[in-house]
Amino acid sequence: MALYTEPINNLIKQFGKLPGIGQKTAERLVLYILKANGAEAEALARAIIEVKEKMSYCRICNNLSQGELCQICQDEGRDRSIICVVEEPNDIIAIERTQKFRGRYHVLMGALSPLEGIGPGDLKVEQLLERVKSEKVSEVIIATNCDSEGEATALYLTEVLKPLGLKLTRIAHGIPLGSNLEYADQATLGQALEGRREL
Ligand SMILES: [Zn+2]
């Protein structure tokens, strides 16, 4: 006997696909939706559709953007000679919160992971190299996560960027080993950025 009817099962399954949501949490979310009034549930559904319709990735840096270019790439006040390389768009938000960086970003859209079959060709590395060559960049800050994938990615980027003869730095100081940038607190991340070491 099925515990839930089909529409409920279906929603549990959809919630269960989200990161960090297990079966129990998915069930709780569905029960919450069932209790919510129609307008509330509809607002949630509409917000999901809207974010997919209206948001895309910046043509230059792969940050989330509402048009062709993200707000940071559009901002004439940002220092174009420094690029901070991160794994995901979320990392930009974390670094922006520190207010310690006035350059621009490049989102790799992931990190190297042999276990998951993610190689350099799956990341936006080629695009980064093009930018470095065409935008007169003098420094690249590698701000990938401090876990094994992030470190492997930093190592790879060092190999391909070093021959271009620019200043190459890596944030390190203060970020606990094995941790994600997005979970680092503002002050720690700010210090990590200021205490970046040259590669
Ligand atoms: Zn951008």
Image (tube, rainbow, N blue to C red):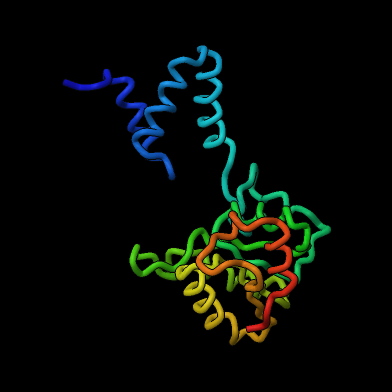
Say left or right for 167 vs 25. Answer: right
Pick the front one: 191 or 139: 191
Residue at image position (59%, 60%) is 181
Quadrant assignment for the C terminus: bottom right
For residue 72, above or below residue 100: above
Say left or right for 120 vs 139. Answer: left
Q: Is residue 67 visible?
A: yes
Name the spot of residue 67 as percent of width and height, x first.
Answer: 65, 44
Residue at the left extreme, as displayed: 1
Pick the front one: 138 or 100: 100
Residue at image position (56%, 35%) is 51
For residue 90, above or below residue 127: above
Quadrant assignment for the N terminus: top left
Pick the front one: 132 or 182: 182
Pick the front one: 146 or 158: 146
Residue at image position (68%, 80%) is 197
Give the quarter of the image for residue 73: bottom right
Residue at the right extreme, as displayed: 77
Name the spot of residue 177 as percent of width and height, x first.
Answer: 54, 69
Give the quarter of the image for residue 170: bottom right
Name the spot of residue 89 as percent of width and height, x first.
Answer: 59, 53
Q: Is residue 127 visible?
A: no
For residue 129, above or below residue 7: below
Residue at image position (51%, 30%) is 49
Give the quarter of the image for residue 187: bottom right
Total marks placed:
0
Name the spot of residue 55 as percent of width and height, x first.
Answer: 58, 41
